[in-house]
Image (cartoon, rainbow, N blue to C red):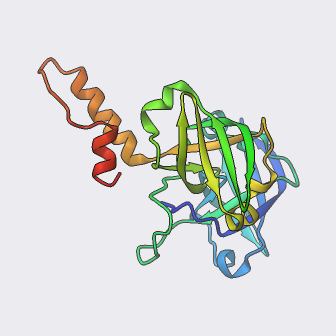
């Protein structure tokens, strides 16, 4: 479990093919945060939950399997690539973002980046299959970063990026056409699942759960 609050930008220093997957070595800079990282711990790389399989002085390694490579952008990483890093949340930590599982739903494409005075607006094109899981003012995770949907239009959504987040994550390196990992809010996915189950039930069920209801109830 993660919160989507990035703690460091790591650098990929090794990419090795292993039985259809990849062994990735990542060098971190925040020694205070990651120096106690140990084997078998979970760590988020650009929003994808990975298990640490080796550690060393200033670095750790993870094995990325075929399933992860098929749903994320991790297969495009090369030596020198920068990645957003976050350690798993502890029960006593402050939840600064939202509940992030590190289970990436899909890769999406940066459509446009707009400069808006002191902030930036990032527009993302996403697959139609995931439309039920996204609402305006709802939470979403982009490359492991907890963000809020500011605008929603057909198969595009926008998030507003404050200068600190822009500087302290890999968002500053994105360009139109860049691919990013998306994880939709787990609460929204469960609600959509329940609505779908009711809709397919032979028993007539009238659901009051819609976008207006979700907003009125704090989702």
Residue 39: percent from left, percent from top:
62, 66
Question: Farthest bottom residue?
Answer: 32
Q: Residue at x 65, y 35 (%)?
A: 108
Disc tally is: 0
Query: Whole-percent x and y of residue 128?
Result: 53, 25
> Residue at coordinates 73% horizontally, 66% vertically from top-left?
168
Residue 157 in sight: yes
Q: Is residue 169 above or below residue 183?
A: below
Instruction: Name the residue furthest left.
Output: 203
Q: Name the residue: 75% across, 56% down.
A: 170
Residue 19 seen in this snapshot: no
> Camera-side residue: 120 or 190?
120
Of residues 117 and 14, which is closer to you in this image?
117
**Residue found at the far right of this picture:** 80
Residue 76 relative to residue 124: left or right: right
**Left or right of 169 in this view: 175:** right
- Residue 53 place in picture, x, y as percent: 66, 60
> What residue do we see at 39% from left, 40% from top?
189
- Compared with 99, 193 (above or below) is above
* Residue 18 spot, x, y in % from top left: 75, 42
- The answer to which of 77 and 163 lies nearer the viewer is 163
Residue farthest along the top direction in this orientation: 202
Q: Determine which quarter of the picture holds residue 188.
A: top left
């Amino acid at each position: 479990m993660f919160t989507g609050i990035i703690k460091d930008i790591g650098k990929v220093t090794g990419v090795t093919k292993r039985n259809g997957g990849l062994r990735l070595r990542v060098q971190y800079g925040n020694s205070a945060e990651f120096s106690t990282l140990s084997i078998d711990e979970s760590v988020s790389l650009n929003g994808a939950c990975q298990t640490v399989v080796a550690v060393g002085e200033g670095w750790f390694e993870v094995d990325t399997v075929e399933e992860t490579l098929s749903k994320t952008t991790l297969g495009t990483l090369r030596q020198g690539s920068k990645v957003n890093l976050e350690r798993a949340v502890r029960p006593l930590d402050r939840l600064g973002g939202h509940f992030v599982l590190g289970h990436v739903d899909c890769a999406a494409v940066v459509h446009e980046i707009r400069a808006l005075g002191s902030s930036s607006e990032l527009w993302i094109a996403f697959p139609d299959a995931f439309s039920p899981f996204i609402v305006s003012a709802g939470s979403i995770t982009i490359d492991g970063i907890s963000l809020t949907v500011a605008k929603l239009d057909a198969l595009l959504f926008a998030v507003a990026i404050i200068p600190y987040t822009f500087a302290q994550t890999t968002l500053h390196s994105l360009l139109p056409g860049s691919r990013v990992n998306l994880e939709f809010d787990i609460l929204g996915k469960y609600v959509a699942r329940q609505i779908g189950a009711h809709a397919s039930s032979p028993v007539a069920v009238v659901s009051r759960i819609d976008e207006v209801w979700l907003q009125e109830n704090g989702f």
